Image (tube, grey):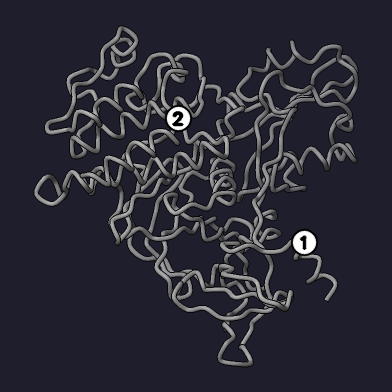
Amino acid sequence: MAAADASRREKWTPGTEVVGRFNFAGDTTDDLPFQKGDILIIVAASKDPNWYKAKRQDNLSREGMIPTTYVMQRSAVKLHAMPWYHGKISREEAERLLHPRKDGLYLIRESVNYPGDFTLCVCFEGNVEHYRVTRRNNQLTVDHEEYFETLTKLVEHYQADADGLCTRLRKPLDKQGQYEYESNLSEFKKTGWAIARSDLVLGDKLGGGEFGEVFAGDFRGMKVAIKTLKDKQAVQAFLKEASVMTALRHPHLVQLLGVCCDGGVGQPIYIVTEFLAKGCLVDYLRSRGRSVIRQKDQAEFSRDVASGMAYLESKNLVHRDLAARNVLVSIEGKAKVSDFGLARDATHNLEGGKFPIKWTAPEALRHSKFSTKSDVWSYGIMLWELYSFGRVPYPRVPLAEVTQHVESGYRMDAPDNCPPEVYSIMKRCWDIVPERRPEFSVLFTELAQIASSA
């Protein structure tokens, strides 16, 4: 009982997500039966602090009482900083940085000769030893004897014991500037986000993303979307996307349901989200066109996306890849922002990486300066897509010349029949000076007014 009480550290508010720790059959008609692993949403507190009214994630019309000792609250998965990870630097650069060469001074870099692997660089007796860190079945190893889930766990192991290295890892050489972060599967289990593989059934393929393919699926009778990892070298990027999603809950953001990470070494990892029946916005626009989609629909989609982005703005999160292809449409016709593969805290800038040129703000392309204001620029491009019924932006400008044209003052014309007030918003989003672009909270207010009068 003490362990169960410890899991409930504060009073739960309506909307809090909890997950079943045990099966609960219910004793009265007022109770809400559930099984271990079921996702529940708190509706209200009761006079008894050990009971709450809740509803099931897969059947929001069914409500009943649940005992707190049978469930645990889901909490956000934290990312772990890697100050000793220096990214894509050469062997020569690593050796230059590791001075003075005191025994045990170390850093980790991305392998130059073996993409997807890493190199552990350690000082010993005036030299720098370079150990290749390979990946096998989603695990990392130096010697093919000890295997680790993450680089952090590998570092912790060799900090405690040299175990075959030239010396124990004694002092990290911290990277200058922003650190990289990583997540691990055990965190999803501890925080209530793990989904059993036996509860999932994969269906038809829906499409593909940066890290994996997306399938329709079934989770305990509920239709879901299941993203599978297709690039085995991108495990960390895949998990970081899921980690970001554990901290987000908003009606216009695609909701994470859980992560499937059981089944042992080498088994694929799945990210499970709510299913949006009408697919991505750009395909929805192109397939329906003007004969089906009215200006009121366009205004409501614009408002929905601005609402979701205002929420991210309030959390100091930057999406970095906002576009009509990353907005999904529900069966009720509501738009929800998806694909958080590039999302980061606003204080963390990416170095390098591939970004969609036509959607990315000039300062982000030139200097990797991402912010909520660079998301606003992308939102302006998404508005243009929306009111042009899914056309590709900058239709008459070669891709290699887009950035130069934009920095020289070029802006796209208004799409046919686009309301002047909406085109005015687009142009404000495309101000070359980031600070002069509107905030998403302001955009939401303006688009809500346009939607209500459309």
Callout 2: helix, strand or loop?
loop
- Judge by depth and name the residue closer to the eye, 101 or 298: 298
Q: Disc 2 marks which amino acid?
A: Glu
Q: Quadrant of the N terminus?
A: bottom right
Residue 398 pos. (x, y %): 23, 17
Q: Which residue matches tag 1?
A: 9
The residue that appears at 60% across and 22% down in the rendered structure is: 88
In the image, residue 229 sits, relative to residue 234, either above or below, namely below
Gap between marks 2 and 1 measured at Cα: 35 Å
Relative to residue 276, is residue 48 drawn left or right?
right
For the residue pair 194 and 383, the one nearer the viewer reads as 383
Q: Quadrant of residue 156?
A: top right
Q: Is residue 306 left or right of residue 136?
A: left
Residue wearing tag 2: 439
Residue 112 placement (x, y as % from top left): 59, 24
Compared across the picture, whether 336 is left or right of 300 comes to right
Question: For the residue carrying disc 1, how many other residues have a C-alpha within 10 Å: few (<14), some (14-19), or many (20+)?
Answer: few
Q: Is residue 304 above or below residue 383?
A: below
Q: Earlier in the sequence, mark 2 or mark 1?
A: 1
Quadrant where the image shows the C terminus: top left
Q: Quadrant of residue 21?
A: bottom right
Give the residue drawn at x 46%, y 48%.
230
Where is residue 173 drawn, in percent x and y? Answer: 79, 22
The residue under the point 81% across, 26% down is 172
